[in-house]
Amino acid sequence: MTDEAKNTVKLGLIGDNITQSKSPRLHRTAGALVGLNVTYDLLIPAELGLTFDGVFAYAQSNGYRGVNVTYPYKELAPFKVSIDDPFVRAIGAINTVVFEGDGPKGFNTDYSGFLNAYRCARGDTPTGTVCLIGTGGVGKAVAFGLVGLNAKTIRCVDIDEAKAASLATALAALGSDTTFEVFTDPVAAANGADGIINCTPMGMVGIGGTPLPAEAMRGATWAFDAVYTPVDTPFLQDAAQAGLTVISGYELFFGQGLDAWDIFVGAPLDQAALRRAIAGHEL
């Protein structure tokens, strides 16, 4: 094996609508900072003519160290991996997979990324009652993060009421002091809420829109958008105009990326240098 091959780490991202993802830049830049040649491929099932299962098998058998998984496959990924952490098993969604000799192992760095993003923006300030719009893969991770932050009430909102109810039931099983409510109407759920969260793909490049009318944000104190392409989504623009403290999805992206890097590679990283390099396209 050549020295170059020894120093190469092959990674990828499985998802739809990911051509604008910043994950390739984050991991390639991280590699350059520690002297590794990191490749990071966008693995879009439709473009490859494969199902999610097919793309997963392709990555597993073609030398990938690991893959990130994003919308809409995070809830399919747990069926392909072993999960050591019982809390992550309870979330029921995976966004990071590492291929080990004894099989693929799954992790959820959206959960830890959200916790870090919230604490960086609001410190120890309580979340209060939270309107969580979207109960898919990232919504589940954020919801579990809200329980970890001792949210007073989580209003699980989804057009699929059964899906929202399933998440509320899973959260209630944790035995926390948080209470849970189920809604299909985001406007009703936002009424009287302290925090408003978008965990739908609405606002993303190629999709657009916002899950909540601007006027429904009045009275809340903070907002978070899991979408980070673009960083300044219509949802966050409306929140800022309404006077809410805004937490960008970029912070979740950066935090989950650092945690995924630790899982994939484990090499110590200068976080400040990585942030500067990504922002300035220095590497």
Image (cartoon, rainbow, N blue to C red):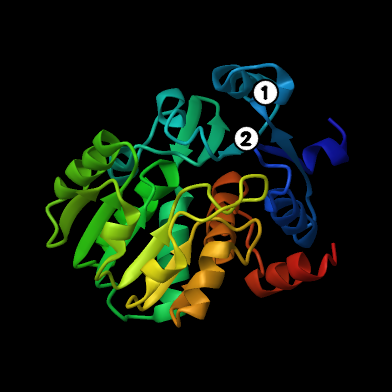
Callout 1 crowding tier (Cα within 10 Å): few <14, some 14–19, many ≥20: few
Query: To which residue does mark 1 refer?
Result: 46
Residue under the point 34% across and 40% down: 159
Residue under the point 52% across and 61% down: 252
Residue 179: % across, % down: 14, 58
Q: Amino acid at mark 1?
A: Ala
The N terminus, quarter of image: top right
Residue 178: % across, % down: 16, 61
Residue 113: % across, % down: 47, 60
Find out whether the residues at labels 2 and 1 contact each other: C-beta distance under 8 Å. yes
Callout 2 crowding tier (Cα within 10 Å): few <14, some 14–19, many ≥20: some
In the figure, residue 42 lies in which quadrant? top right
Residue under the point 55% across and 66% down: 251
Lateral position of residue 72 relative to residue 78, left or right: right
Visible residue check, residue 283: yes
Secondary element type, mark 2: loop
Disc ID at residue 97? none
Residue under the point 41% across and 24% down: 79
Task: Return the disc, 2 or 1, that comes first in the chain's sequence.
Answer: 2
Query: To which residue does mark 2 refer?
Result: 16
